[in-house]
Image (cartoon, rainbow, N blue to C red):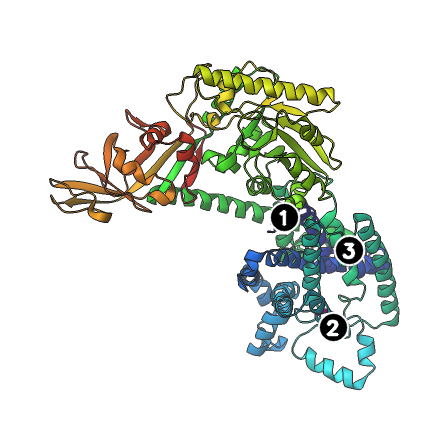
Amino acid sequence: MIASQRGRAGVNIDGFKLVAALLVIAVHTGPLMTYSPQADFLLTGIIARLAVPFFFIASGYFLFRKAMNDYVSSLGWKPLHRFAFKTAKLYGIAIVIYIPLNLYTGYFTAAEGFSPGGLVRDLVFNGTFYHLWYLPASILGMYIAYALYRSLSLKATLTAASLLYMVGLFGDSYYGLTASNDTLSGVYDGMFAVFDYTRNGVFFTPLYFALGALAAHQAVRHADGGRGLSFKANFAGFAVSMALLFAEGMTLRGLEWPRHDSMYLLLAPSVYFLFQCLLIGKNRLGISKSAGLYMRQLSAWIYILHPALIVAVRFAAKATGLADVFVANSLVHYLAVSVLSVAVSMLVVYAGARRRRRDAVNHEVHAVKHRAWAEISLTNVRHNLSELKRVLPGSYAVIAVVKANAYGHGSVRVSQHLSALGVKQFAVADIEEAIALRNQGVRGDILILGYTSPSRAGDLKRFKLTQTLVSAEYGRQLDACGKRLRVHVKIDTGMNRLGVLHDDMDRLLDCYKLERLTVTGTFSHLSVSDSRKPEHITFTHKQLQRFDHALAVIRAAGFDPGVVHMQSSYGILNYPYREYDAARPGIALYGVMSNEDDALRSQVDLRPALSLKATVTQVKAVEAYSPVGYGHSYVPERDVRIATISIGYADGIPRELSVHGGYVLIHGQRAPIKGIICMDQMIVDVTHIKDVQQGDTATIIGQDGSELITAGQLAKRCGTLTNEILSRLGSRIVRVYTQGG
């Protein structure tokens, strides 16, 4: 599986897209023309020509990277159709934006050659404004490259795209050769009757999308343990290609061959090596993923809007008598257009972000009004964290356990909140949970508590994750992958689940000798720390002693065990006096315990963070002895009023709740669940509750008036643990986060 399309590489690439957008402005303003036409050509005719191909190769990389995922491949053309739809939507917006300028320049007049056929030609090839050719070229070029890729090998795709590019060269920078041959000249004249330039979606674009596919293929191979060119090798390739590109550009200019100067032979390798440098290079500026997304959006709008702002700067300069400063001086003109383009684009991106936030809120409100939702108090999460830290020795660090979607509370938002509170270490069950956090910008150490296939070693390294060594043999398998990884060694002190046995010292010490694995932590897990039975207390002390002895042997052998941690929620509250480096609170962070009746040694004020609610979708009267629901399991013996609630077992509600006296709260009163709970709905008796109507709120977990249903009560009624009730809450339940109690 391809785990991520935008990690460190995405940030680097998004950052350069912003540079590329500024280079495109340079192409259209000639910033050095006032000072040196030769220098301006080097900048705008050669260096800045990297910009648009870079946009294409980046789009190709991310789309083909997805297409190389087995699951996405099974979707056929759907990924491409989504790409085309998004690009076409942006193209449509840009066309509308430039209609006033089209009217001003007389685009729609017969004198300028406007005709229905000409409009179609511009829409497909040239763009309705000079810079908008890029958008239809993206769509057309991607369809060509994708069709080649699906029907041919990658090598054949690159060959076919290169041949199209060669055809385009002779209508662009190498047109001088074409013009000297009457036959070729006639062919190209016929082509130019269809489109203005061979720099378009047929000849120019497919090669760069195919190069994006090549980069994606190499990235997948590298993730699977294959070798590729190093950063230094790619940088050397870029430097040599650029030097040759300068020579090619200057030579062609001297020969006066170019009809246009967008297509060069050496442009393709130059852009490819540049892209690879950014793809495998380090994010030295420490740019976050959210900042990368912002730069990506900003660069797109700079590209779309800058021609209009060129006109605006020139108009304003002429109106104010400052044309000699802001227009005649090409560098000042470029800077003015760039600053204005960035500023206006920032406003557009900001407005879009506000609209998306508003839509997200409206979506949550819509879900709250019309189906099921969980209200999660981040204030209570913060309070619970403080209570647990109060119990622990002051030197303890907290490793927040956010597995199973943070026990149903939403791992991303909870982790982001805890990170803002100073928590720097998190624990999850598997690699997918870890990657989901990384993709949402969660930093710090993320420990995977369970098994990860050695085939995913590339993802462990790429996302800077810490893997648990579940056995010495597993450690050797990971070490053989050739990746330098961070690991925690798990010692089995009596749980008999995962880990190296505490008394198998040879295998245990082998875990610290592995060449490519860096041990940054050592831990174990208590199996009966939730119980205050004498025999269980004795066993827990035995586990602690076994752990301490193993640590002593590890240290005596000259190895650093790293961060040492043993206690989870019950270990913290029942054995807080142990002196380790960190603790792993899970269920207690969310204000509940696995069983409400458990006796705890430490007295803490835990506050439940989650309330679960749903909407009353219908209220109706049912006559006595009329069966209700599946299987006729509920047949009232009197006339009743029933309400249908929009939540069911597919949302995580235990189906057996209805046969164990379960109820919900409506208007602060108990409404017993009747009949079998359905996949998406349940039925409750509201005969005794006045004025219940469609749209009312039913509380499944939480408080309504003086009545309270806790997750622990619901779990006890169903004969299970609070952990199970909360962690099984489904993805259809919208999580609504509050800062209140």
Q: Position of residue 626 (x, y in %)?
A: 14, 47
Q: Which residue is at 77% across, 86% downward?
A: 183
Front position in the image: 329 or 684? 684
Tell me the kind of residue under disc 3. Answer: Phe
Q: Position of residue 253 (x, y in %)?
A: 85, 68
Q: Which residues are magenta?
A: 161-168
Q: Which residue is at 47% across, 25% downward?
A: 588
Q: Is residue 300 left or right of residue 326?
A: left
What SS does tag 1 mark?
A: loop
Asked if the stretch drawn in magenta spans residue 166, the answer is: yes
Callout 3 crowding tier (Cα within 10 Å): few <14, some 14–19, many ≥20: many
What SS does tag 2 mark?
A: helix
Compare marks 2 and 3 and give the one earlier in the sequence.
2
Q: Position of residue 455 (x, y in %)?
A: 64, 47
Tell me the kind of residue under disc 1. Answer: Arg
Q: Any mark on residue 239, and which?
A: none
The residue identified by callout 2 is 163
Q: Are marks 1 and 2 in contact (CB under 8 Å)?
A: no
Instruction: Specify the farthest residue to the bottom.
Output: 183
The prevailing secondary structure element of the residues shown in magenta is helix
What SS does tag 3 mark?
A: helix
Asked if the stretch drawn in magenta spans residue 719, the answer is: no
Tell me the kind of residue under disc 2. Answer: Leu
Quarter of the image for residue 373 reads top left
Measure how far apart labels 2 and 3 are at the Cα level: 20 Å
Quarter of the image for residue 152 reads bottom right
The residue identified by callout 3 is 273
Callout 1 crowding tier (Cα within 10 Å): few <14, some 14–19, many ≥20: some
Q: Are marks 3 and 1 in contact (CB under 8 Å)?
A: no
